[in-house]
């Protein structure tokens, strides 16, 4: 049986590239028949990475047959996985997020969750000496994942291990990190083809805050102006997205990669209260700038309160 390797819904670069890296390792080093798949359409940055490194876009799956062997990467949250995940045979989990309850396995499995900025960093460590056999395009995928998740080392989630491993891979590939990251972030910033509903779900996590369901969305960009020009339309779309997704509110943070700050859209008093209590912000309009806020995992989710 083929083992499916996948990350979370609304796949970003890490949830697109890491399944490719790990499926290559399982196939070529461990002798396990494995296939990378996606749980949705990858974002524009991830598509750029696939094209740049001449990688095939993994198949997008919507159903997960019972008893399928799977390895879960870049998440351990059942809300971000197929509805039938506990009917599958989970054989491994590799992640860098907080542990969330709800997954069930049929026996002991290898779980590797480390406090690093990127799943691909963990994979590089696990592959070890066999990394020497890794082809150029797989190395490129791993480097891209690390640069994306660390925002080229700007994110507070960045560790020295992430930084050192990224530089090591870039040296092997002859890649100038700054020049390549600029191209990645430019691709990520071009969201003109997406509807407001798609943008609100593009890089989004479900989160329960004191019994209130939230969809916490982040859009990372080097050009926030085009997104902020659409703020009225984005806020108008929030109630529909929240209702369809079973959430009470949608929180949208537009992260300016270069200025290292986030702008939170404030469509109503509930979000205003969340912003003021969570970040000590003084909200006077329909947006609030949060200096230094860049990471949903380390700065946004842990701070949320009502």
Image (cartoon, helix red, strand yellow):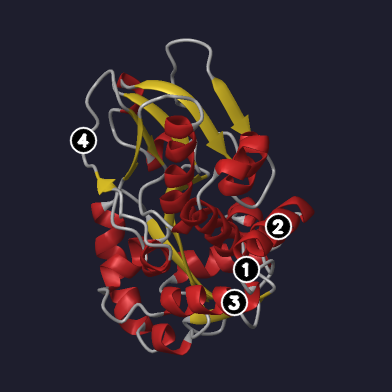
Q: In this figure, which residue is indicated by the disc labeled 3?
A: 257
Q: Is residue 24 left or right of residue 279?
A: left
In front: 285, or 255? 255
Instruction: Say which quadrant the N terminus sits in.
Output: top left
Rounded to the nearest angstrom, the CA distance separating label 1 from label 3 is 24 Å
| Element carrying mark 1 | loop
Instruction: Say which quadrant the C terminus sits in.
Output: bottom right
Rounded to the nearest angstrom, the CA distance separating label 1 from label 2 is 10 Å
In percent of width and height, residue 258 lies at 62, 82
| Element carrying mark 2 | helix
First along the sequence among labels 2 and 3: 2
Residue 38, above or below 90: below
First along the sequence among labels 4 and 1: 4
Residue 11, above or below 133: below
Residue 197, above or below 135: below
Q: Is residue 96 visible?
A: no
First along the sequence among labels 4 and 2: 4
Q: Is residue 228 visible?
A: yes
Choose mark 2 or mark 3, whichever is in front.
2
């Amino acid at each position: 049986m083929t083992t499916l390797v996948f990350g979370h819904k609304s796949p970003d670069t890490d949830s697109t590239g890491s399944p490719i890296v790990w499926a290559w390792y399982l196939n070529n080093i461990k002798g396990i028949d494995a296939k990378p798949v996606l749980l949705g359409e990858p974002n524009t940055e991830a598509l750029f990475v696939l094209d740049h490194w001449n990688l095939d876009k993994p198949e997008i799956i919507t159903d997960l047959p019972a008893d399928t062997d799977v390895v879960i990467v870049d998440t351990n949250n059942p809300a971000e996985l197929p509805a039938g995940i506990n009917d599958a045979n989970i054989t491994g989990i590799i992640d860098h997020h907080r542990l969330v309850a709800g997954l069930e396995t049929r026996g002991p499995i290898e779980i590797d969750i480390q406090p690093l900025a990127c799943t691909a960093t963990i994979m590089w460590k696990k592959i070890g000496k066999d990394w020497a056999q890794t082809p150029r395009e797989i190395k490129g995928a791993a480097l891209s994942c690390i640069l994306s998740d660390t925002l080229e080392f700007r994110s507070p989630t960045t560790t020295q291990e992430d930084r050192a491993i990224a530089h090591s891979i870039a040296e092997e590939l002859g890649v100038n990190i700054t020049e390549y990251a600029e191209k990645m972030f430019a691709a990520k910033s071009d969201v003109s083809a997406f509807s407001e509903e798609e943008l609100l779900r593009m890089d989004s996590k479900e989160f329960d805050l004191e019994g209130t369901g939230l969809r916490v969305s982040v859009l990372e960009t080097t050009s926030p102006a085009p997104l902020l020009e659409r703020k009225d339309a984005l806020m108008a779309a929030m109630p529909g997205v929240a209702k369809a997704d079973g959430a009470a509110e949608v929180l949208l943070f537009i992260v300016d990669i270069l200025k290292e700050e986030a702008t939170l859209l404030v469509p109503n008093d509930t979000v205003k209260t969340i912003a003021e209590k969570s970040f000590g912000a003084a909200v006077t309009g329909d947006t609030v700038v949060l200096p230094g806020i860049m990471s949903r995992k380390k700065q946004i989710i842990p701070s949320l309160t009502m």
